[in-house]
Amino acid sequence: IKYRNRLGGFLVNEQLYDVYYLDSIIADKILERFQVLTRPKIQKLNLNEASFKEVLSIVYIDYELTKKIFDYRDEVAEIQSLEELKQIEGFPLEKFDRIALYLQAK
């Protein structure tokens, strides 16, 4: 419940697999009976306007990754597409879909 609250609610079923200490077998069983039917309204952060602290507040982004994102943003002046994040060395590609739920590039 704490993790769900940190997310602001589950946006996709797969986020259940990210709950700390929840075995994937248990998550599979839960998803047999429960699904995300209504997505909570999440205000996506604009990467080009967001503060360091705002980006860091996203569950899937730690301090080191936030720093890399801001270094990249400083280098390119403006991020045109979230796909650009994949070019950042060390960016966790396996988490891209989850991170993209909370960000936008306008």
Image (spheres, grey):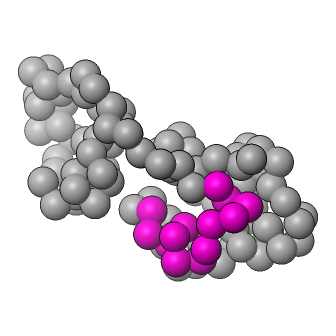
Is residue 82 in the magenta section?
no
Residue for point 28% across, 60% down? 6
Report whether residue 96 is seen.
no
Q: Which residue is found at the position 39% from the left and 62% from the top?
A: 59
Nearer to me, 84 or 7: 7
Residue drawn where x is 65% and y is 78% of the image: 67
* Nearer to me, 55 or 92: 55
Taking 17 as reference, is 82 left or right? right
Number of numbered tags placed on the structure image: 0
Res 75 quadrant in image: bottom right
Looking at the picture, how far across and down is residue 44, in whole percent?
A: 53, 49
- Does 81 appear above or below 89? above
- Position of 10 compared to 105: left or right? left
* Residue 8 locus on image (x, y percent): 30, 51
Residue under the point 11% across and 31% down: 30
The relative height of residue 9 versus residue 85 in the rendered view (above or below) is: above
Relative side of 49 to 65, left or right: right
Residue 61 image offset from top left, x and y in percent = 50, 65
Where is residue 57? Give x, y as percent.
44, 69
Q: Which residues are magenta?
A: 46-58
The quadrant of the rendering that contains the N terminus is: bottom left
Evaluate whether residue 75 shows in this view.
yes
* Residue 53 part of the magenta segment: yes
The residue nearer to you, when weighing 106 against 92, is 106
Question: In the image shown, does 56 or 60 lie closer to the viewer?
Answer: 56
